[in-house]
Amino acid sequence: MSAKIQVAKYYAALERLIARGEPINNDAVALEAGSGRGSIKKSRPAYAELIAVIDAAAAQQTEIKVTSDPMPRLRMDLEDLRRRLDQSLDREVALLYELYALRAEVKQLTEENGRLKSGRLVSVK
């Protein structure tokens, strides 16, 4: 089979793989075209343009897969929620600490006020 006819079969096979969304590489294109695995070789000058087109299609396919994959975005959202939860828990702990400190101060002042009213404690000026 002439190289031009074989290259045309490879291009048609590449288009079919793109349409189905299957993984694209040299071996997949060769198998889809009915040839053996490894029949598209970089050492063959007739396939240089075909290999460039296959590489470009594979790169575009991985780019589309990365942008459409929700997992990285969900991981970032999860990390953001964890960070926000930690910050809110830190605020809660700080507020509880302040609450306990203020309650202790109120208790101390209430006891001191009671002693002052009963006359047991003389204030020093």
Image: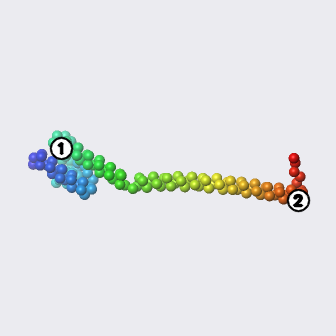
Mark 2 in CB contact with mark 1 (< 8 angstroms): no
On the question of residue 36 being in view, the answer is: no
In the image, 85: left or right of 47?
Answer: right
SS of the residue at dot 2? Answer: helix
SS of the residue at dot 1? Answer: helix
Q: 27 and 59: which one is in front?
A: 59
Question: Which numbered marker is on residue 29?
Answer: none
Label 2 environment density (alpha carbons within 10 Å; few <14, some 14–19, many ≥20): few
Q: Earlier in the sequence, mark 2 or mark 1?
A: 1
- The image position of residue 5, as x and y in percent, is 11, 49
Amino acid at dot 1: Tyr
Quick one: which residue is furthest to the left in this view?
1
Looking at the image, which residue is at 36% across and 52% down? 67
On the question of residue 88 being in view, the answer is: yes
For the residues marked 2 and 1, what is the alpha-carbon distance in whole angstroms? 104 Å
Residue annotated with mark 2: 118
- The image position of residue 87, as x and y in percent, is 57, 52
Amino acid at dot 2: Ser
- The image position of residue 124, as x and y in percent, is 87, 48
In the image, 4: left or right of 22?
Answer: left
In the image, 2: left or right of 26?
Answer: left
Residue annotated with mark 1: 47
Q: Nearer the viewer, mark 2 or mark 1?
A: 2
Report the colour scheme. rainbow
Q: 33 and 20: which one is in front?
A: 20
Looking at the image, which residue is at 32% across and 49% down? 63
Looking at the image, which residue is at 88% across and 59% down? 118
